[in-house]
Amino acid sequence: MQASLVSMPRLGLGSIAVIGAGVSGCALAAQLRLLGHQGPISLWETGRGPGGRASTRRSRQDPALRIDHGAPLFNITAETDPHLLQPLLSGGWIEPWPGVIAQLQGESSLRLGQSDAMGLGTLYRGLGGMDHLCQGLLSLASEAFEAHYGTLVRFLAWQDGLWQLYGPDRQLLGQAQWLVLSSTLLAHPRSRMIFGWHDVPLKEAAAALADLQLDHALTLIAGIRTEARSNLLVVLDPAAGQPWRELPFSLLHFDAAAQQRWGLQQITIQPLADGRCAVVAHSSHAFAADHLDVYGTHSAVAKMLQLPPDEGRQETVIAALTAALEAVMAPWLSRPDLGSSERQLMRWGAAFPLAPGLPAELIFCAQSRLGFCGDFIAGVGFGRIEGALRSGENLARQLCSQ
């Protein structure tokens, strides 16, 4: 059932800086505009564009290439739809997902129509690629925002009534009256491991604010654990891809026993418009945890940190995932040799948050003019795109009530 949009008055909310242009950050911007907020909104994102896990890999040199290398779809499980769902559908940004889900149980027992929590409810995908979900959300924001892609925010500070955002060299990037973190990265100790930092940016800034609610939120965020994924991206030419296109499923989910046996969590099959076929094999968390320091040559974070390519280790990971993919698909494909196909690696270091997450009553810290949104917020859709959408909407309503 579609809930109606309810306009709320905006009482001098002012400028808002949103760190992270994934689904929740883009949903926040869209909902703020739909609720009447007219103030400046700036988006700050380390990646090349919006999307986060709802991204699509494309190539200027290969216009037909389109690979959803993170989430291949999203589902809505609650009776009441997110407010933004209908505008996205009517705007032609998303569509019902047309595929078939199956589950691999144990060694090779296939069960059509069975899946994990991602297959429950009503399924959708970005029309023309999952990245169109966030592009659609930003279109609802009327493009009245500043987007800063490929930008790493390193330091945060509250000064003279404004949140200050600084880069790695302490250069001032921007400032705003309100700050929103749409991921946990700058509030979580893992930022020190990823970037080699000595401090957690938001925790460092919060020390001078004396905001007990924010301190409580930061304590809980620090305890949120996540699961990683190492994803193998394969592009098959039309002849090699035809048997994959003819399989009775387009998404294969692995149960716990199958994940342990094969080191994979799911496989998605994505036919391309020119006859080729893309296949994405998502590793299990256990496999990814053993290879967390292998980013892949296409990693935006690795390029931003100027990490030297470790092609030897990357090839080892690609070979292991390729061997698992070939072996698990052998019962349905005759000699699925992927050795000559184009293959890439994509690592998602914090792909899925683990419960309980951050309680919804802590997402809005009015005293510090700060908010949180993302799939790590407890509630309906936790750990999924649905949760990211709903948390962005919820935070927008709280901001607009100020």
Image: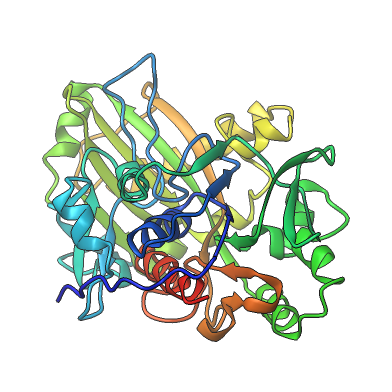
Figure quadrant of residue 73: bottom left
Q: Position of residue 398 (x, y in %)?
A: 48, 76
Question: In the displayed structure, would residue 115 be above or below residue 165?
Answer: below
**Is residue 97 visible in this depiction of the protein?**
no
Q: Is residue 261 left or right of residue 165?
A: left
Q: Residue at the location (14% across, 45% down)?
A: 247
Location of the N terminus (image quadrant): bottom left
Figure quadrant of residue 256: bottom left
Q: Is residue 27 left or right of residue 369?
A: left
Of 268 and 221, which appears nearest the observer?
Answer: 221
Q: Residue at the location (54% across, 47% down)?
A: 43
Figure quadrant of residue 287: bottom right
Q: Residue at the location (72% across, 57% down)?
A: 163
Q: Position of residue 125 (x, y in %)?
A: 24, 51
Q: Is residue 93 left or right of residue 197?
A: left
Of 294 and 7, which appears nearest the observer?
Answer: 7
Q: Position of residue 367 (x, y in %)?
A: 69, 78
